[in-house]
Image (cartoon, helix red, strand yellow):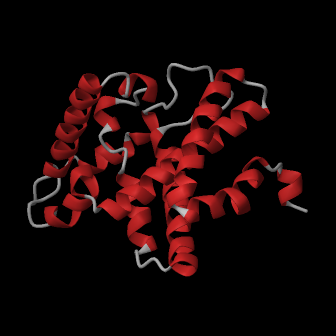
Amino acid sequence: MQQQSTFMAWVTRMPLIKRWALMHCFQEENISEHSHQVAIIAHLLTVIKNKRYGGSLNPDRAAVVAIYHEISETKLQDLNSKTKYHNPEFTRAYKKLEHIAEQECLKTIPADLRQEFAGLLVQDNVEKEYKSIVKAADILAAYIKSLNELRFHNDEFTHVQEGLKTTIDELCLTMPEVKDFMDIFCDSCTTTFDKISG
């Protein structure tokens, strides 16, 4: 009889963790939904990078890294980025908590399978190139969220959208795949169902 692992409990509890908890939202979002969207965007960014800009990353790996990138929040919950990056000392302390939570999650995997997950669950182990793609996808997903909230006249997200747009403009200077995403896909993210249906 093999010992039961709590790993899937970490995963199945992700839909319970609310994002943007300190803000009024027209449409609530949880970390499971967010991670799914980030995975799709990371996959797309990697395909663009490879096909158009000579990249050689694996889009599937980018997507899987993105699926797990918020796993620590199952234990810590979502923290507003303004709070998280308020000052360097607080950021370091919170990053340490995230690392501890990721290590705890990794230890729930049976020992003979653990190595396969070490580079997915523990963000310090993720290769720099994949980390960059997932971070860009994370920012783009938050930007799309802000656009959707603003579409329904939720001015709580005005400053969020402005701040993220500045960050995205900076990313576009070094990541042409992000610029392509913005040019080709971003505006249509708020398209209505009727328009999608033709």
Percent of width and height locating residue 82: 45, 24
Residue sitting at x 16%, y 49%:
108
Residue 65 shown left or right of residue 102 in the figure: right
Question: In front: 127, or 120?
Answer: 127
How many numbered circles does the render carry?
Answer: 0
Relative to residue 47, is residue 98 depicted above or below?
A: above
Q: Is residue 40 above or below residue 166?
A: below
Which of the 4 quarters of the picture holds residue 9? top left
186 or 103, which lies in front?
Answer: 186
Horizontally, residue 152 falls left or right of residue 164, namely: right
Up-down: is 25 above or below 95? above
x and y, in percent, of residue 98 in the image: 25, 37
- Between 191 and 112, the residue placed more toward the observer is 191
Q: Residue furthest front?
A: 173
Residue at x-position 28% and y-position 27%: 88
Quarter containing the C terminus: bottom right
Looking at the picture, how far across and down is residue 63, in whole percent?
44, 63
Quarter of the image where one finds residue 87: top left
Q: Position of residue 154 (x, y in %)?
A: 72, 24
Residue pictured at 27% horizontal, 51% vertical? 123
Left or right: 132 as drawn, with respect to 48: left
Q: Quadrant of the N terminus?
A: bottom left
Q: Residue at x 57, y 20 (%)?
A: 23
